[in-house]
Amino acid sequence: MTLFEKALSVRQNAHAPYSNFKVGAALRTKSGKEFVGCNVENAAYPQGTCAEAGAIAAMVAAGETGIDEIWVVANSSETVAPCGGCRQKLAEFSSPETLVVLAGVEGERERRTLGQLLPDSFSGEHLP
Ligand code: THU
């Protein structure tokens, strides 16, 4: 399965009864392993989590920490890009060259690098 197919598939498991907006994400690490995530909403709205966060959590739980490429799939007339919080979460495990592919349910729409999505990002290098 391609990363697109994996993101499309996991999107079906999204728990989005409040927004009715299902999102799937699939990433490949620098070592070639692949992880998926979907958005998981909650009746206490701020407790919901994004698809990208789910994929990142699965990756870290498996002992991986470097993202090479991530696909995000949503069904929207406007192309969906990761929210600000997810851009920061991705930056923790990415380089500015990390590829972020934005897709609809029909396939790829646009591609960006994380550096394009989150320039001048804050990182652990700024901490004393
Ligand atoms: N959402 C994601 O999972 N990823 C994105 O990149 C954009 C937004 C989710 C959060 C929420 O469950 C729903 O989409 C509507 O905002």
Image: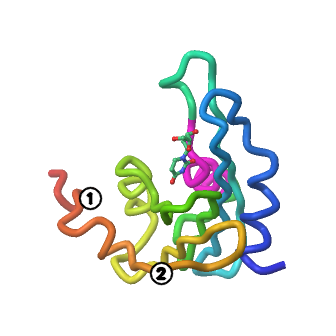
Position of 27 compared to 14: left or right?
Answer: left
Let me know if residue 22 is in the magenta part: no
User: Main SS type for the magenta part?
Assistant: helix
Residue drawn at x 84%, y 78% is: 1
The boundaries of the magenta stretch are 49-60
Kindly identify the amino acid type of the residue bearing the numbered disc 1: Ser
Residue 46 vertical placement versus 114 (above, below): above
Residue bearing mark 2: 111
Q: Position of residue 68 (x, y in %)?
A: 54, 79
Disc with the residue nearer the chain's start (2 vs 1): 2
Q: Position of residue 117 (x, y in %)?
A: 33, 68
Q: In the depicted view, which residue is nearer to us: 102 or 91?
A: 102
Circles 2 and 1: CB atoms closer than 8 Å: no
Q: Which mark is residue 91?
A: none
Residue drawn at x 79%, y 73% is: 5
Residue 76 vertical placement versus 40 (above, below): below
Q: Quadrant of residue 36?
A: bottom right
Q: Assign ligand 1 to one image quadrant.
A: top right
Q: Farthest residue to the top: give it.
A: 44
Q: Quadrant of residue 73?
A: bottom right
Q: Is mark 2 within 8 Å of ligand 1?
A: no
Kindly identify the amino acid type of the residue bearing the numbered disc 2: Arg
Q: Which mark is residue 123?
A: 1
